[in-house]
């Protein structure tokens, strides 16, 4: 009877070791993909931020180059029509 359980245990041990290796490989691939996705998202956000900073600086430079009347005309499109006191 003990020999039966020892034989069964040795077979189960082999399957458990195989399953452990498979789970480790799957977990490693998942974590690698997750880190890669995070880095890709960070690169995309950095590019978007750089474009926004560039565009903001261009607009700021353009506005700084205008005289007061030109700035007023340009900003009048952003004002509400009903100017309440």
Image (spheres, rainbow, N blue to C red):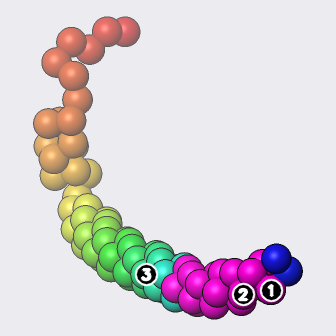
Please state if 23 lies on the left or on the right of 62 as rendered: right
Please state if 15 lies on the left or on the right of 46 as rendered: right
The one nearer the camera, 81 or 44, is 44
Q: Are marks 1 and 2 in contact (CB under 8 Å)?
A: yes
Tell me the tag on residue 54. Answer: none
Element carrying mark 3:
helix
Q: Quadrant of residue 33?
A: bottom left
Mark sitting earlier along the chain (1/3): 1
Element carrying mark 1:
helix
Please state if 84 lies on the left or on the right of 79 as rendered: right
The residue tagged 1 is: 3
Q: Is residue 32 magenta?
A: no
What percent of the width, then of the height, locates residue 80? 21, 22
The residue tagged 2 is: 7
Secondary structure, magenta segment, majority class: helix
Q: Are marks 1 and 3 in contact (CB under 8 Å)?
A: no
What percent of the width, then of the height, locates residue 22? 52, 85
Q: Quadrant of residue 51?
A: bottom left
Comparing marks 1 and 2, which lies closer to the viewer? 1
Residue pictured at 25% horizontal, 65% vertical: 59
Mark sitting earlier along the chain (2/3): 2
Disc 1: CA contacts within 10 A as few (<14), some (14-19) or many (>=20): few
Marks 2/3: CA–CA distance: 40 Å
What percent of the width, then of the height, locates residue 62? 22, 68
The residue tagged 3 is: 33
**Vertical comparison of 42 with 28: above or below:** above
Tell me the magenta residue range: 3-23
Comparing marks 2 and 3, which lies closer to the viewer? 2
| Viewer can see residue 7 | yes
């Amino acid at each position: 009877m003990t020999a039966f359980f020892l034989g069964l245990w040795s077979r189960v041990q082999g399957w458990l070791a195989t399953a452990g290796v498979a789970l480790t490989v799957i977990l490693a691939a998942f974590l690698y993909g997750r880190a890669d996705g995070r880095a890709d998202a960070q690169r995309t956000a950095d590019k978007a931020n750089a474009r926004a900073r560039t565009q903001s600086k261009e607009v700021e430079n353009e506005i700084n180059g205008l005289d007061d009347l030109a700035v007023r005309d340009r900003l009048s499109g952003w004002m509400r029509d009903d100017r309440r006191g």
